[in-house]
Amino acid sequence: MEKDRKEGIRGMANPGRYGIERVAYWLMRITGLGLLFYFIGHIYETSSLLDGKAAWNSMLELTQTTEGHIFLTLVIGMCVFHTGNGIRLMIAQSGFGFGKPRRPDYPYTPSSLNMKNKLCIYVSIGLAALAMMYGLGVMYDV
Amino acid sequence: MTKGGALPKGFESPSDLGSQEKYEEVKPSSKTMTLRISKFNPDKDHAPTFLEFPVSYEKWTTVLDAILEAKNYHDHSIGVRYSCRQAMCGSCGMNINGKPRLACFTKISELDSDVVTVEPMNNFPLIRDLVVGFERMFSTHKRIKPYIIREDSEISSGTKEFLQTPEDVEKYIQFSSCIKCGLCNSACPTMAADSTFIGPQGLAQAYRYIADNRDQGKDERLKIIDERHGIWGCHFAGSCSQVCPKGVDPAMGIQLLRGYLLGYRK
Ligand code: HEM
Ligand code: SF4
Ligand code: FES
């Protein structure tokens, strides 16, 4: 234990203690970084076109393996969750969807953790799962 | 108070009860739990140790009661800070079973656990055992100018008190309940990685004064918070509002505050 008790990245990442909103925060960061990673890879992949048809085809082969399929499925999931939750965040972070402040009464129920926000998070996760299943179906021809 | 009809049991006035007052006998529940207290003096010790005490508790026993029992009867050296014992002073914040809470406002029975572990709050510098330093939070709080700013004053001659309608008060009253306990800063994931972040406590107070229609310091305060370690450090994880013991809902204040900077609010 350090003297300043700063939790650091571990505390930042820990999604277990503070409800679904903290899980969404954690997923948003991970998927944002994952997509950035994919985006860089994607530029590298598509730039192989410049080296002709054979190079491009051999690049595409990489995605036709089991690892490639798992990777693409994850990308689909990350895309859908990041977009869904991103739209929720853009609305909420502009100050919409909380109602008006009011005199707090015990037991306090914070409006920022309201059902609308929770529902959007669950829907984003659900849509991501559905899209991943659809993607797997297409890739494995079922 | 019940209107008409009899008062609930135990609340009858003495005349209802004849000459003798009667109280319902409360049977002790005599449950026992293990209290684990983190001991660490950064000036002397190398690593924290945990002291363990068996503590019996009732439905209403608070974590602070249990800590004080351990301190009074087992180990006087336990470092703990408290004052009001009723969630008013904001001094007894600590990690209780992994989450920041007020020790005086947390009943052992509500934790639903046979082991209660108390540690100092995260993201604050440790002084000793359960006590952390609030200097930075207080100075950040001061930085956002937590007072009404305007040229005239209620006490200068020729002015009267500044009147507000109940609706005007409603706009900020929730945020004025802050007791500066620091639980929100301790739960915040940005605070965990960025110790120059203003934090939910300070940002919510910036909103409290900006939303007050007596105040004219909006532009000054917005300038202070409009930076990376200010309002833009918030990613709306909502954990501050999850732990706030006073219903302040700092996360809401911060998002409403952003509305001013983005031009949705005037
Ligand atoms: C329609 C698509 C997208 C939307 C609506 C969206 C929305 C957002 C929003 C609102 C945030 C801020 C989250 C916060 O306050 O914590 C964010 C963060 C981020 N996004 Fe996106 N985004 C999209 C696509 C992408 C793509 C394609 C990439 C990668 C190339 C990406 C990479 C990131 C990264 C790295 C972060 C930072 C992580 C964080 O702050 O949590 N995003 N996105
Ligand atoms: S906003 Fe709530 S949790 Fe934060 S310091 Fe104030 S009372 Fe404590
Ligand atoms: S002792 Fe005052 S808030 Fe707990």
Image (cartoon, coloured by chain):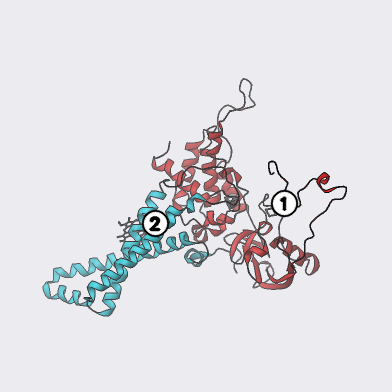
| Residue A50 coordinates in the image, percent (x, y) | 14, 68
> Quadrant of residue B116 in the image?
bottom right
Q: Which residue is mark 2?
A: A120
Chain letter, colour red:
B
Q: In the rendered view, does B53 fall on the left or right side of B172? A: right
Query: SS for tag 2?
Result: helix
Q: Residue at x 68, y 44 (%)?
A: B2
Q: Residue furthest front?
A: B5
Q: Callout 1: residue from which chain?
A: B
Q: Residue at x 72, y 71 (%)?
A: B32
Q: In the rendered view, does B52 fall on the left or right side of A91? A: right
Q: Which residue is mark 1?
A: B84
- Does B128 sit above or below residue B234? below
- Does B3 sit above or below residue B60? above
Q: Is mark 2 within 8 Å of ligand 1?
A: no
| Residue B189 coordinates in the image, percent (x, y) | 50, 60
| Residue B257 coordinates in the image, percent (x, y) | 46, 44
